[in-house]
Amino acid sequence: MSTDAVGHAYPRLEGREKVTGTARYAVEYPVDGITYGWAVPSAVVRGRITRIDTSEALESPGVLAVLHHGNAPRLAPGPEPELWLLQDPAVHYRGQYVAVVVATSLEAAREGARLVRIDYDAAPHSTVLTDDHPGLYQPDHVNPSYPTDTAEGDFDAGYAAAPVRVDATYRTPAYHNNPMEPHATTAQWRDGRLLVHDSNQGASSVRGTLAELFDVSPESVRVVTEHVGGGFGSKGYAKAAVVLTALTARHLDRPVKLALTRQQLFGPVGYRTPTIQRVRLAADADGRLTAICHDAISQTSTIREFAEQTAVYTRSMYAAPHRRTTHRLVRLDVPTPFWMRAPGECPGAYALESAMDELAIAVGIDPVELRIRNDTEVDPDQGRPFTSRNLVACLREGAQRFGWTDRDPTPRARRDGRWLIGTGVAGSSYPARARPSSARATARPDGSFLVQINATDIGTGARTAMWQVAADALGVPPERVEIRVGDSDLPTAPVAGGSMGTASWSWAVIRAGQALREKLREGVPPDGEVSATADTTDEVGGQPALPRYAYGAQFAEVRVDADTGEVRLNRMLGVFAAGRVVNPTTARSQLIGGMTMGLSMALHEEGLLDERYGDWVNHDLATYHITGCADVESIEAYWLDERDDELNPAGVKGIGEIGIVGAAAAIANAVHHATGVRVRDLPIRLDKLVGVSALA
Ligand code: MOS
């Protein structure tokens, strides 16, 4: 018996709970005797705490305790130095949490935090990334484990010999993850066991980190993430909030809730590193690439190396005989950068896909055609064929749907009253990965099934997708299946990140379903309940290392006010080839969500740091601009019906991140087409285009 739940547009299982407000997030669980924590950030960038005076805070009504390095429970030094909080007086970046005030109400905790007096011995600091920073160095590898530099052929010679060349440097600023739900935790210690309700992207990994830090067994820790209000990468690991809350609950021996404020999300939870990227492209007169070089510079902190894989996108996207990529990093007195939707691929594609547009103009070839001409069936980096690569099909279908044919390539050729109109295109790709996972399937006497896996639904619809996959694996209608996710007591599963959640989890769910059906064929015990557990560690680990990628083509049409330089996105259209789509409704949300973040990156978002204070100047939603509904006039996402049997049992490639890759380049390219002005440093603010009508 086979069913076909996969591929159907089921609404989210928890949709009703969410829209009626009964779905519980990390700090919304009722807990007897609860107390409230408020984190105190450091007021200097670098240095040491010389004195903490808590007397005034402790006298404030409702304040129960002030935790700091002088009195906090000891943590075991773990693999993440930035989580070793309240352990020593050293300050490594502005905003580092140096104390927690806990009180009987949120207001009392906040007032108490205002009254903590801290003296520092401040040292000089360096917080701004430049391409000539004396601290630039070559890391051993870039995330997650790519070689830092690659070279094939002779780039310098190939570049020098080519008739057409582009040499351009692109800059992207810091970007801050702003999930609707902040990093937030409720923690309680009961009989030596730690229970946390936490907002994160992977409860199994958070459990492991907490167990290490508090020096208890993983079985002594339970992390519940039933509903999570977004993460975009920033909640991919255990972060400060969960550690501070668990620490405070242990110190006080009472349950504690702690949620970071919106302002506190700017910095210590991680952000996308600023980048400086030089791209050089050379081509023959027909637009065939002969040489590609991508040199990327980004930053990390002084306490942990985070080496964003900015130029990795360029290694596999287009072919050329002479190729080189490099990454350089500098340790600044800043919070450690971290994952933000398509870390590496996103800023890297902005640079490469902008340079491809510059090359198309230099060589006089349509930018869609230029990309088609430089397509390759063999991964230029690994030298092996891709399991499937439908970039060209995405470009062709996108061009047709968007109405690209007969585009006049001349900049400023289209005008509608005061608006200059332009269109742009970019390619897109993202690796299709999977990680080992486990899952359990149970047949119940009443004919229903229970499927359990510690997947995390960060708002993407993962719970619903796994329910559909489980139904098909069990060969029953989905109505007979109950799915449980979001609890570290469930079978261990990897993080909702890297666009590999669905691939990884569905693999284990399918294997558990198959194992259960096998068992059921052998007979049913008297109590009528049968369970089977699957673990894909060996199977995933034994998979050949083939180049697996999802692809896409992004098209944008903008209008630019010829006098003020205001840029508006008329419409955006993406076509993606991402394997099998489990749920068209949630998939579409993921893709247009990614594209909308790309719009935000192109036109709005910009983290500005004041070097004097080493702090973010714009650190709330009033001053850090994020695309709002009114900025989105029309965004459409389509996908090809793609089959790739070399991926995983569900045939999925992952769709969480590819929507943002290339999106900003398509918009920047459209702005150039509209105005003739090439903006190479994001965001494309109006001051970079003001008075464009007067420019030649
Ligand atoms: Mo994504 S940046 O891997 O959560």
Image (cartoon, rainbow, N blue to C red):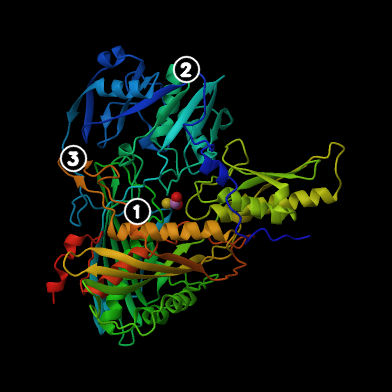
Residue positioned most to the left: 694
Query: Mark 2 is on which residue type?
Result: Asp
Q: Give the residue pinned by disc 3.
A: 125
Q: Position of residue 373 (x, y in %)?
A: 40, 82
- Residue 357 in the image: above or below residue 61: below
At 57% from the left and 28% from the top, the residue drawn is 220
Q: Is residue 149 visible?
A: no
Label ID, residue 141: none
Callout 1: CB less than 8 Å from ligand 1 = no
Q: Nearer the viewer, residue 121 or 588?
A: 588
- Dot 1 alpha-carbon crowd within 10 angstroms: few under 14, some 14 to 19, many 20 or more: few
- Residue 83 in the image: above or below residue 289: above
Which quadrant of the view contains residue 293?
bottom left
Q: Give the residue pinned by disc 2.
A: 253
Which quadrant of the view contains residue 583?
bottom right
Q: Give the residue pinned by disc 1.
A: 628
The tag earlier along the polypeptide, 1 or 3, is: 3
Quadrant for the N terminus in the image: bottom right
- Measured Cα–Cα span from mark 3 to mark 2: 38 Å
